[in-house]
Amino acid sequence: MTQTQSNYVKDVLVSTDWVEQHRGDPGLRLVEVDEDILLYETGHVEGAVKIDWQLDFWDPVMREFIQPDEFAGLLGRLGITPDTTVILYGDKSNWWAAYAFWFFQYNGHTNVKLMNGGRQKWVAEGRPLSTETPSVEPTQYPAGQRDESIRAYRDQVKAHIEKVRAGAGAMVDVRSPDEFSGKVTHMPNYPQEGVLRGGHIPGASNIPWAKTVNEDGTFKTPEELRALYEPQGVTPDKEVIAYCRIAERSSHSWFVLTQLLGYPKVSNYDGSWTEWGNAVGMPIEKTYVAE
């Protein structure tokens, strides 16, 4: 497979052209993952199956992911084997598709790529959409081992604050500037979602996730991406933790840092601000002052 732009560290992107030409190839599974979980039914790339990130990835009771055997069952239902190349795409510049990419990697299925530009670019180019749900033959997918090195937990994040202060680590808050400052506790044009405190984790740099993509939803060049992170001290030699609200936007930034730029030590804090902003005793910085 060819990259859609040159000089990215890993071969993890395919173009819309490539998908239209190869979507029926054996050993390939197209998967749509949207923020709007009803969007798939209005039309999708022919042959693509659907993942509902809430129903399919999250435990229905605990604030936790499904377990490895349940993930294996999900992939089996979608007709995926350990040898299947999974091509993910979705709405909103692929942010939930990137969340799925991170989750697949976390659960051990590493043969995954993103369609650069996602659904947005596919539709803008006038490419065909289908409303037919494809029939797939279920498989027996074996439960794998999780890669805990790419997931950060609250106590790890708290300890990481000292690494940031010492210059050995970096923290990336990928939310909007108003969320970072503490002016609001939610994304622009979204409802308040139950976080009691606004602000950010001490030492974090605010590098909003959407700055990494062009207007058509495709990723910016490696040079442009490095120019976003390196001036703020987010460099490949450091251990980096990314976070947002519930880890969907930070998964997108994790993808940029690890897959496109090749940073070797980046983890995604999936509890993110909905956990940190509600936790008792966790340190918070807030820069917004009401007039």
Image (cartoon, rainbow, N blue to C red):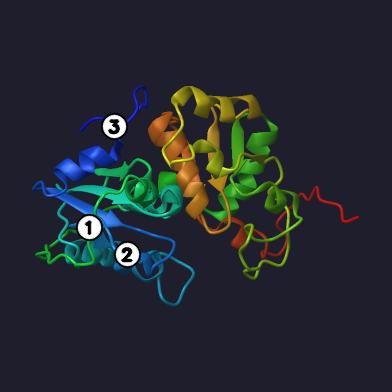
Above or below for 207 versus 137: above
In this orientation, which residue lies closer to the viewer: 74 or 30?
30
Q: Specify which label sits upstream in the sequence, 3 or 2.
A: 3
Q: CA distance from mark 3 to mark 1?
A: 21 Å
Circles 3 and 2 in contact, beta carbons < 8 Å: no
Q: Find residue 108 and report its horizontal and vertical position in percent.
A: 28, 49
Label 3: element kind: loop
Q: Specify which label sits upstream in the sequence, 1 or 2.
A: 2
Q: Given the image, on which type of amino acid does mark 3 rest?
A: Asp
Q: Find residue 156 and report its horizontal and vertical position in percent.
A: 56, 49
In the rendered image, the quadrant that contains the C terminus is bottom right
Identify the residue under disc 3. 11
Identify the residue under disc 2. 40
In this orientation, which residue lies closer to the viewer: 157 or 242?
242
Q: Residue furthest front?
A: 126
How would you rate the neighbour count of disc 1 (Cα within 10 Å): few for under 14, some for 14-19, many for 20 or more? many
Above or below for 27 versus 68: above
Q: Given the image, on which type of amino acid does mark 2 rest?
A: Tyr
Identify the residue under disc 1. 48
Q: Given the image, on which type of amino acid does mark 1 rest?
A: Ala
How would you rate the neighbour count of disc 3 (Cα within 10 Å): few for under 14, some for 14-19, many for 20 or more? some
Q: Residue furthest bottom?
A: 61
In the rendered image, the quadrant that contains the N terminus is top left
| In this rendering, the label closer to the viewer, 3 or 1 | 1
Q: Quadrant of residue 261?
A: top left
How would you rate the neighbour count of disc 2 (Cα within 10 Å): few for under 14, some for 14-19, many for 20 or more? many
